[in-house]
Amino acid sequence: MSTEIVRLLAQMTETWNAGDSAGYAGLFTEDVDYVTFFGLHLKGREAVEETHRELFKTSIKLGESDGEPQIRRLTDDVAFVVAGGTSSVNGKPDPSRTSVVTMTALRTPEGWRFASFHNTRVSRP
């Protein structure tokens, strides 16, 4: 299970950096709850694709992750995932864009997909 979820995370980075909004959205369940770092709640795969189609026209790319993701199995078909990293803008890492992301991974007939996604910017209190 962990290998498949790590592969799913790698596909997130690949599709994001390729600007592939349909491929990116396809990594989520049809009814995903997706919350951006600024609090926008997208409901469903279609909304994720539509929103990212515009976002992917920018120069924002996902960079290296902050170590191994934490994957906690809740059942045989559900896992809680915590991952993080820093994005780059115009090819340069931007520490102000460091985020931690929490996700719920769900085994579906299509394979593992993310049923929830919540991105939070890392900052000091």
Image (cartoon, grey):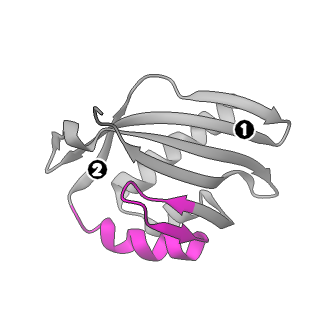
Q: Position of residue 50 (x, y in %)?
A: 45, 77
For this view, does 108 lie left or right of residue 114?
Answer: right
Q: Report if the CB atoms under discs 2 and 1 are less than 8 Å apart.
A: no
Vertical arrangement, residue 82 with respect to residue 17, above or below: above
Task: Kindly identify which numbered label has been placed on residue 61.
Answer: 2
Q: Position of residue 70 (x, y in %)?
A: 58, 27
Find residue 100 and report its image quarter: top left
Q: What's the magenta region?
A: 34-58
Q: Looking at the rendering, in which quadrant would you find the C terminus? A: top left
| Residue placed under numbered mark 1 in the picture | 79
For this view, does 60 lie left or right of residue 14?
Answer: left
Find residue 85 and report its image quarter: top left
Spatial CA span between label 2 and label 1: 26 Å
Judge whether residue 40 is colored magenta: yes
| Disc number lying in front (2 or 1) | 1
The secondary structure type at the circle numbered 1 is: strand
Vertical arrangement, residue 121 with respect to residue 67, above or below: below
